[in-house]
Every structure is written in C-alpha cells, then in structure tokens.
Image: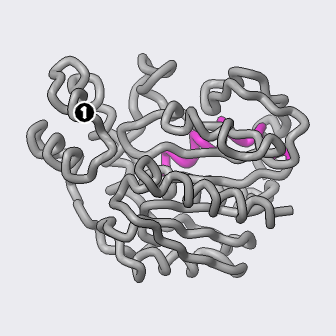
Amino acid sequence: MSTYPATATTSAHTGAWARSHTARPAARLRLLCFHPAGSGPSFFRDWPTLLPEDIEILPIQLPGRESRFAEPHLTDYRQAVEQLYGGLRPYLDRPYALFGHSMGGLLAYGLAAAARRHGDRTPARLLVSGCGGPGTAPAKPGRSDWSDQELVADLRQMGGTPEAVLTDPDLLGVILPVLRADYAICDSFRRPDGPLLDCPVSVLGGEDDIYSIDDLRLWSAVTRSTTSVRTFPGGHFYLSEESAGPLLAAVKADLADTA
C-alpha cells in the first residue's frame, strides 16, 4: 500500500494535477480526463456543460503547460505514471472513471494499473480513445526527434490544430517543446506490471484514424471484465469534429451504466 494521502475535497480549482472550474462535490462519479499530446486540461473545457451534473469532470494537467508552464516536462512513461499516481491518489477516494485520448489514453490506463497494483480503489470504468492497445506497432515512432517542419506537417495532417496556430512562430515555439516531450512519453510506453484490471473498458476511435479496429481491440487484454469497441466518423481528432456529439453520448451512456 502507498503512503500518499488518501482523501481530497475537490474545489473550483483543485490541485496542480487536476484542474476544474465546475466543482460538483455531491456528484456520484468523478471523471478524470487525460489530454492528448501537446494539449492541456482546456481540451476538456466544454465537457462539464455537455455531461450530466451527477458527473464531476476533472481534467488532468501534466507539467510544462497552462498553469504549470514553468515546470519541467515529463518525458518517460513510467515516471509520468508514478507522478500522476502520487498527485491524483487523493481523488480516488470515491467512485471514479478515467477517460483519455491518444497519449491521455495510455496515461489513464497507467493510472488504473497503478491503483490496482497498490490496492487502491480502482476505476469503475476505463475509457480510452484514439490509441491502440498494448502490443500495437508504433505508428509514428521517434517523433520527439522530428524537425519543426516535420512536426507541423504531421499536426496539419492529423487535424485538430487551427491553421493560425501552425503558422504562428511564437505559438509554435511554445507548443512544439511540449509536443516533443509528450511524444517521448508515448515512445517509452510499456505495459505496466501487475494484475489485470477488474473494470469494464470502453474503447473509442475515429474510423479514419491511424489505429485500426484490430489495434483498438487489443485493449481487451488489459482487463478481466468486458471490453466494448466503437468507432465514429473522423480521423485522430474525431472528438473535436462532427463526431463530438455521438462520442459524448456514448460516454454518457457508458457512465450511466457505471455504478
């Protein structure tokens, strides 16, 4: 068992690792949301108004971005999971679920595995989006070492980043170091040691993403409970496109089934 503090009361701002402006202390369920590479907790800024009020949305914030801009970036998956577990364990004291997109899906899974390994309350459900399960062949390895031009071209191809950002040198000077650090986390992903999860896993993805349906199905190997796989129209950032509504409807339905 860990010696980290085990309880927390969420507020409108919470702590360094969890940033929320819509505290719901009476909510039946917390949903911890993990942002994709190069992003931050504002990725989920609209979710509190789009999901039921009995769910408290807690966007997770890694160092080196938004209000943690001055802190050094994390670049190793195992280290990132250890620090996430230490920082977020106080928020695992009552029923919760985890949602993560792309890099965030890998980190959400890492936190669930850490909670299971340490004997803490485990998530009522794990929802992973836009990433293949353990064993997926790296689609774009080594991106942390790509040139600025290569990274910008890749961002443009994936979508989800406004063109005004991709053509602004000052903004790129802020974003690209964060992106490289996050890609290093993805490249160092290894399936955590420990027992299988005991919660249902919802796997979500874009029909035109780089991850195939077979890649998404690999998530079934991480749990002894049930796994569902659903895809939506769109690419890697389908959840920021026209599929945002159907995705949130799916998340709402899955969380409604979560005791």
Q: Whole-percent x and y of residue 181?
A: 32, 39
Name the residue at 41% across, 37% down.
39
> Toward the viewer: 33 or 22?
22
Does residue 139 appear left or right of residue 4 in this picture?
left
Residue at mark 1:
176
Does residue 186 appear left or right of residue 220 in this picture?
left
Please state which amino acid type lies under the numbered disc 1.
Leu
Look at the image and give the residue range highlighted in magenta.
Answer: 78-94
> Toward the viewer: 56 or 116?
56
Q: Whole-percent x and y of residue 55?
A: 78, 45
Report the residue that reaches farthest toward the right: 26
Name the residue at 46% across, 53% down.
239
Q: Whole-percent x and y of residue 138?
A: 29, 67
Q: Is residue 82 magenta?
A: yes
Name the residue at 69% across, 21% down.
13
Disc 1 is placed on an element classified as: helix
Residue 53 showing in the rendered view: yes
The quarter in which the C terminus is drawn is: bottom right
The image quarter containing residue 246 is bottom right
> Toward the viewer: 2 or 160?
160
Q: Whole-percent x and y of residue 100?
A: 54, 53
Report the magenta stretch's main SS: helix
Does residue 196 appear left or right of residue 91 in this picture?
left
Q: Is residue 207 magenta?
A: no
The image quarter containing residue 161 is top left
Residue 113 showing in the rendered view: no
